[in-house]
Amino acid sequence: MVTAKRQQQRYTNRDRKALLARFHASGCVNEKQFSRENNVKYQTWQGWRKKEQQITSSKRHSRKATLGGQGRKPMIPFAADLLYYMRERRSNNKYVGVFHLMQWIRRHKNDWLVAYIAAKKSEEVGFESLRCLLLRFCARNRFTHRKPCVSKLSQVVLDSVWLGYAAHFHTKYADYPNSTILNAEVTGLYFDMPPGSTLAEIGQPSKVDKVQKHSERVTALLTIRADGMTSTKLSLTLCM
């Protein structure tokens, strides 16, 4: 005969705090009897009593079932400082690569770097492991490799211009409701792209007709309302 497995009871932070407060208010001395009367396993109750100060002082949401702090600890203890350094360089339109992160760690966290490399099989393996660790750190914080583009103005100047124009626009058109203000964006779409190369016999020219050399282009007009309402969807306008 197969016995039914006992279903595990789930307690929230609110439940733990309420039961602990009820225990102290009741003046009960026999903890085993109290746990039995409140349908709580005695082993579970003992665990709560050991962590009573942590449970009662916790500010975690009452609907949560844990006190927080679970999961694997981060391998980079200075992750916040490293992320700040990356964002600061990007805000100044500077390159950011794994090499720059290694140099920052060497300058500011050299003790940690020495201990990390010493724990590996060799120095070469240690630096390769560090490179992979930093790449995972970048991906976890939404940093990806992208092709750099040149900007004539810094991002700080561009942000100030954008904020100034936004203030001027909303001051000038303050009498208009947001539902009547439309933001339009024009972008080009290319289709029937020709191949980048063609098969040609050796010694013969690789010329192609002009009609086949250039792709077709259409202009798309994207429009959105200033109030952000998407219930009345604005159609996409295409111009040949």
Image (cartoon, helix red, strand yellow):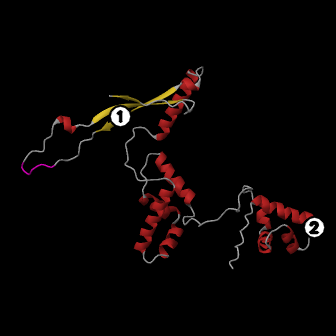
- Cα separation between marks 2 and 1: 76 Å
Q: Residue furthest left?
A: 203
For label 2, the residue is: 27
Q: Quadrant of the N terminus?
A: bottom right
N-term-proximal mark, 2 vs 1: 2
Q: Say which amino acid is labelled 1.
A: Gly
Secondary structure beneath label 1 = strand
Q: Residue furthest top?
A: 175
* Residue shown at 49% from the left, 53% from the top: 142
For label 1, the residue is: 188
Quadrant of residue 168 in the image? top right
Q: Say which amino acid is labelled 2.
A: Gly
Q: Nearer the viewer, residue 81 or 21?
A: 21
* Residue shown at 26% from the left, 37% from the top: 215
Q: Quadrant of the C terminus?
A: top left
Q: Position of residue 141 (x, y in %)?
A: 51, 55
Q: Magenta span has 175?
A: no
Q: Position of residue 153 (x, y in %)?
A: 43, 38
Query: So how many labels did they put on this image?
Result: 2
Q: Position of residue 191 (x, y in %)?
A: 30, 38
